[in-house]
Amino acid sequence: MSNIGEAEQHKKKGNAHFSNKDYHKAVTEYTLAINKDPNNSVYYTNRALCYLKIKNYVNVIADCEMAIKQDPTSVKGYYMLGQALTEQIDFDTAIKNLQKAYDLTIADKGSFSAEIVQALLIARKKKWSLEEKKRIDQESELLRYVKGLINAEREKQLQKVSSKSNMFSKIVNSHPPDVQEKMDIINQAHNDKLSQVEQVFSQSDENLKPRDLPDYFLDKISFNIMHDPVITPSGITYERAHLKEHFKKIGHFDPLSRRECRESDLYPNLAIKEAIEDFLSKNGWAADY
């Protein structure tokens, strides 16, 4: 038997182990297949999927990069690479690879574009959540710093005023009325400053709180926010991936108008796409709505 034939036998055994959820044994068989035929990208993506199941993201990345090297059009390679990079908190690179997977599957009329869209939206939401946490931490630190400056200035002014009445204070254990009045004014002025600063920071948080999600951002099949909105001849906008699934499973017609419609009849809704992108840049919580 040739090396390629032996490699295919190991692949079949690996597939059987994978079906039984015995991912470690599947990895062993796919590794033997790679040893026999190291130029077959499928063996790398099969093993990468096993590693993804057992959350060995470093090996997922390595195998997907090898698969892409062997086959630059490997949708599964880019897809799983994006998923692993998302788990490794490398969101920008993850999104780049997931977008590549999506573009390839659309160009090739692939069958799992909806799954790629979901992974893309999850990566974008996680990126936004991380950036939002950093923003909140930075604002909290800045608020503490500004309040510290205000209180330091308060103490400086109070000491300047009270130093003039130290002797009197020691005798009667209080400040003269005129000095106490000045200290009260200083305290009130700085308390007002603290309140104003806290109000400014509070308003900043209020402006960034979730807003209502416009209905026209939602796909009319899955009711999820759209990533690649397209318009049918009936003038209705859908998520491209879910509309393709509808064509494949149900038939070539518009789900709402019921008029005949094929993939070649669709064209991008760039205005809605731009509006969604702008909304998500300020409301990342909605990315996988």
Image: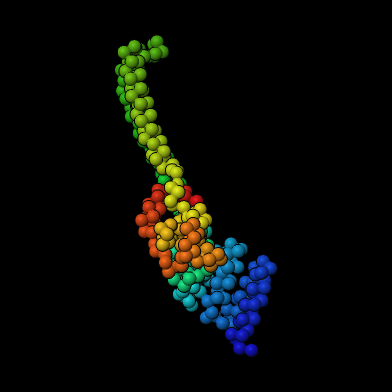
Residue 260 place in picture, x, y as percent: 47, 65
Classify residue 259 as left or right of residue 26.
left
Can you say whether 147 is above or below 208 in the image? above
Residue 76 visible to an observer of this rendering: yes
Residue 276 place in picture, x, y as percent: 40, 53
Residue 63 place in picture, x, y as percent: 53, 71
Q: Pick the quarter of the image with the N terminus.
A: bottom right
- Return the residue found at the far bottom: 1
Classify residue 200 as left or right of residue 25.
left
Can you say whether 266 is above or below 164 in the image? below
At 37% across and 52% down in the image, what residue appears?
275
Residue 122 visible to an observer of this rendering: no
- Return the residue found at the far right: 20
Q: How is the image coloured?
A: rainbow
- Quick one: 187 or 196, which is closer to the camera? 196
At 42% across and 69% down in the image, what residue appears?
264
Classify residue 160 as left or right of residue 65.
left
- Quick one: 251 or 149, which is closer to the camera? 251
Residue 224 place in picture, x, y as percent: 50, 54
- Quick one: 62 or 128, which is closer to the camera? 128
* Number of callouts: 0
Can you say whether 284 is above or below 140 in the image? below
At 57% across and 64% down in the image, what residue appears?
52
